[in-house]
Amino acid sequence: MKQVFRLFSFKAEGLVEKDVSSLNVLRRLPAYRNSWSILSLIIVILILVPNVTILFNFFTNKAENWDHITEYILPDLLKNTSLLIVFTGLLTIIIGTSLAWLISAYDFPMKRFFKWALILPLAIPPYIAGYTYNGILNYTGVIQTTLRNTWGIEVDQKYFDILNLPGAVFIFTLFLYPYVYTITRAFLANQSASLIENARLLGGSPLEVFFRVVLPISRGAVVGGVSLVLLEVLNDYGVVQYFGVPTFSTAIFQTWFGMNDLNSAIKLSATLMFIVFSILILEKLLRGRKKYASTTAKARPLRAVQLSRGRGWAVFSYCLIIFMLGFLIPLIQLVDWMFLTFEKVASPEFLTLIWNSLFVSLAGALLIVLFAVIIGNFARTHQSRLSKSAAKVTILGYSIPGAVIAVGISTVFIELDSGLSRFYESTGMESRLFLSTSLVILISSYIIRFLAIGYNSVESGFDKIGNKYTEASRMLGMNMTKTFFKVDVRMLRAPLISGFLLAFIEIIKELPLTLILRPFNFGTLSTNAFKYAGDEQIHEAALSSLIIVVISAAAVFIFHQVLEKESN
Amino acid sequence: MYVEIKDLCFGYTNAKERTVRDFNLEIEQGEIISILGESGSGKSTVLRLLCGLEIPEKGTIHIAGRTMTDERTFVAPEKRGIGIVFQDYALFPHMTVYENVKFGLKAWKRKDRSRRVQEVLELVNMGDFSKRYPHELSGGQQQRIALARSLAPAPELLLLDEPFSNLDADLQVKIRNELKAILKKTGTTCIFVTHDREDSRALADRMVTMRDGASYDWDSLCTTREEESQKPELVRLK
């Protein structure tokens, strides 16, 4: 009898199972009915809409110039973009991993200084670096003038012209390698000690150890770093425009504003988005299942080996050269130009620029942290597919180039405005494009693009405190919102501040979005620097650039200190 | 029955098999029940389901005449009136002992709050420690504070998740006896999960053994053991 009953219950189980899984969604619904999940979903939709619009329009809308573009322009764009990606990728890998390995594995003069100083090139936005180097190297620049006036040497201009594709690669490499360097170094310092020490004990020569052990095990970190570099390259507008290397960003600007053909701009954007997605998929494949965090809890730091005198100084020189090229030389040049033009540039209007920059950066960064916290809290309290995809979407924006986001968000806002036109008329407003010409569109675009930065920081903070305090608080009768203010925020202070700072820096440096979406007659430090540089007034661009560089460098320094403190 | 759990089923999103499968249990008011099982048997998950920290796929939970979960209802954790002591206590590190214990008293009248805090602190013999921060306390002291904190709002049901696992052996026996005295004194209905048969025997009025929730073997799904007879006996047959 019991046997029979068991058999029966087994069958019944199988039947019930299916019913339950569909019912399950309904059962879980009440738990989603709170302001946190609703707000999160709204934010996610706001982020998705512009991007989906682009992909959607790619297949539907006809564009007048699209045939012309695919025939005459697209091949060039693809060629330039691939060359930039391949060479910048290779060179940043070489410089980034070699520096990371030398700093983690060896002791040499001034190593402690280089450890963070080698991150500093990240504080100089590539477009500022680009026109600064052009200013140093061109006919009226410091090198050629000195050669001419002191030794009377006239040089062949072709050796000093960097306004071309190799020049752009040079700039991207020098000012973006820190992405590879920092991620790889963090990996090597914390995760690899036993493997590398074993390889050393087994008698591998330093070069053998590097190529046969270090590079393979840090593959995940290197791929992670280099894909960030490539996304930055695809995002860039300033360098390629100034250097005259047509890429997707410049083509989007040109079709949109030069040819007044938004539909072609959308199609170009979609094409660029496909390239971005291929890079992201490639990254996944190359990284395999290896994340660049070790699974074992006890990670021992790698012990550095003292280098002999000669070798020590050789490594020192290598680091010094990269540091000088990537930070010191452009910085000194900017300071020099700043003194030359300070009186001309510094004016009440300039104060407005500073104020504008600070205002959009502060507003953007605050909203980013706020949104990041809302989604982060939603994602960790509702462990479900929905919340996980919300988190993924949040990060999506960071990989999409600024020009593409600008196209998408403009399309959406213009639609919005035409939908609201009745409302505008009834309130007697003159502008038919109120939203699309206001700061709302600019700040929204910053949020879409940089939400990932705030989110990563907030998420790691949530990971660290875990769910137990929140659960304890809820079991003591506090609801999610009260818990959040009484418990979570107090413990999240550090990650909130760092997320805010990082987002702030990114916004203050940002160029393509700001150029396209700013209201009429609204300038920021970055657009001002770019405008001066574009008008052949490189010296006048120095003050704006310096302010950006100094703020960013200070933040990089603070960051390094915070990270060091945490790892100790 | 004071607590009634019927046909409870639950599986974590990533797990292939359900962690809790057709779990049934009835408890009378003032009873101390222990759920005994090896790690991975799903016993802590049952507590989380009772709290409302996880949502069951199927089944119902009634506590003190209120429906906490069924097909249509889901009462949020903060509205269930359940107290829980977590395995690692989860004392708020940025609050003093006093603030920790007072945290759950927001429904109480303002003037009664500090009296209540002092009362439960005395109950766990920690009356002099109200100004300390959690990190300034030993493991055993933290455990008492966590207990005091969950007792303070006078919960209808108290849950203890492996309450002794972080204590060393001597302390374990001492606190075990004290705990039983406190629970009986306050008349609290209590469920605690443990993997230690000794703990179970010393503290509980009734034991429930849980094994591999995915098993189809009815006898081991959910059985009570009377302490005296030590004979397995089915809780409920369908």
Image (spheres, grey):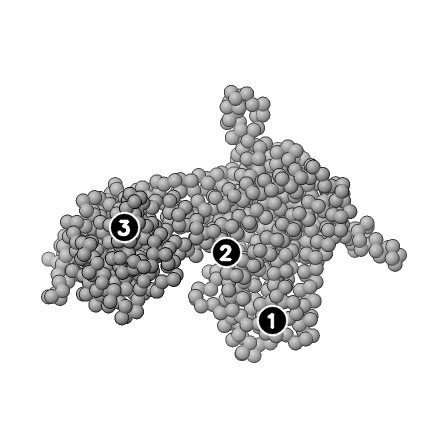
Q: What's the CA distance linking mark 1 and mark 3? A: 61 Å
Q: Which mark is residue A284?
A: 2
Q: Which mark is residue B70?
A: none
Residue B141 is left or right of residue A95, and the answer is left
The residue lying at 26 percent from left, 54 percent from top is: B120
| Residue position marked by numbered label 1 in the rendering | A106
Up-down: is A211 above or below A365?
A: below
Crowd class of label 2 (few under 14; some 14 to 19; many from 20; radius 10 Å): some
Front residue (pair B195, A42)? B195
The residue lying at 27 percent from left, 70 percent from top is: B169
The chain to which mark 1 is attached is A
Residue B102 x, y percent position in the rendering:
32, 50
The disc labelled 3 sits on which kind of residue? Arg
- Asked if the residue under mark 2 is in contact with the one under mark 3, i.e. CB atoms within 8 Å, the reply is no
The disc labelled 1 sits on which kind of residue? Tyr
Crowd class of label 1 (few under 14; some 14 to 19; many from 20; radius 10 Å): some
Front residue (pair B34, A219)? B34
Crowd class of label 3 (few under 14; some 14 to 19; many from 20; radius 10 Å): some
| Quadrant position of residue B178 | bottom left
Is label 3 in a helix, a strand or a loop? helix
Q: What's the CA distance linking mark 1 and mark 2? A: 31 Å
The chain to which mark 3 is attached is B
| Residue position marked by numbered label 3 in the rendering | B116
The disc labelled 2 sits on which kind of residue? Lys
Q: In the image, which is nearer the foreground, mark 3 or mark 2?
A: 3
